Image (spheres, helix red, strand yellow):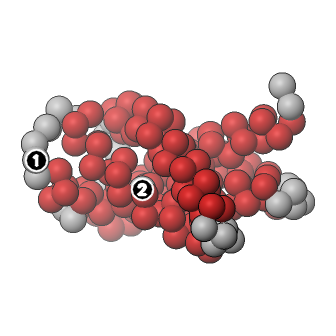
Amino acid sequence: MKRSVLFYIWVAIVSYLTGPLVYSVTLWVLEGEKVKDINKLLTWTAPTFFSVGILLFLLCIILLRSINKYNFWSQTLAFALVGIIPITIVPFLTGFSSVSNFNFVVSPEGTLFILFFTSIAIVCSYGTWVAQKKLNKIPFIIISVVIFILFIIIV
């Protein structure tokens, strides 16, 4: 397997780990609570990110390149905007299937998931940008190691 493919896999994994980390820290800072069952959070969000999220991010890159607007900031903004789609999928995975899933996005719990998927979008955008432009990977690897260690400690 090529090293670039392995780097993209590493970007996806580290990006995903950022979401539960930000979710847990935000819940603790704002509500003073800890995540009661991290396994449920991971079960609800991992399939959504690794299937729908990555596909949407890829489509964003293709679209931005086709209209010649591909740069780091447009990519990051596009990743954050399409993050709303996985947020609306979370209620289906938790067993609440209704037409009012967009109400979930503006609820207090939905706000935590907005931060969850926005943090994923930022880290994924940076990692993808580093890989696409063949920039120095050391800063991203340092950031990813810090995220990984914090994930182990906090979550």
Q: Earlier in the sequence, mark 2 or mark 1?
A: 2
Amino acid type, callout 1: Val
- Local secondary structure at mark 2: loop
Residue 120's x, y, as percent?
53, 54
Q: Which residue is mark 1?
A: 99
Q: Is residue 105 visible?
A: yes
Residue in the image at 27% along x and 49% along y: 88
Q: Disc number at residue 83?
A: 2
Q: Check disc 1: other Cα within 10 Å, few if <14, some if 14-19, many if 20+.
A: few
Q: Is residue 56 left or right of residue 65?
A: left
Q: Which mark is residue 22?
A: none
Determine whether, in the image, residue 141 is placed left or right of residue 88. right
Residue pictured at 43% horizontal, 57% vertical: 82
Asked whether, in this view, residue 109 is left or right of residue 96, the answer is right
In the rendered image, residue 62, in percent from the top left (x then y), is placed at 61, 54
Q: Nearer the viewer, residue 134 or 115?
A: 134
Crowding near pointer 2: few (<14 within 10 Å), some, many (20+)?
A: many
Asked if residue 65 lies left or right of residue 134, the reply is left
Q: Quadrant of the N terminus?
A: top right
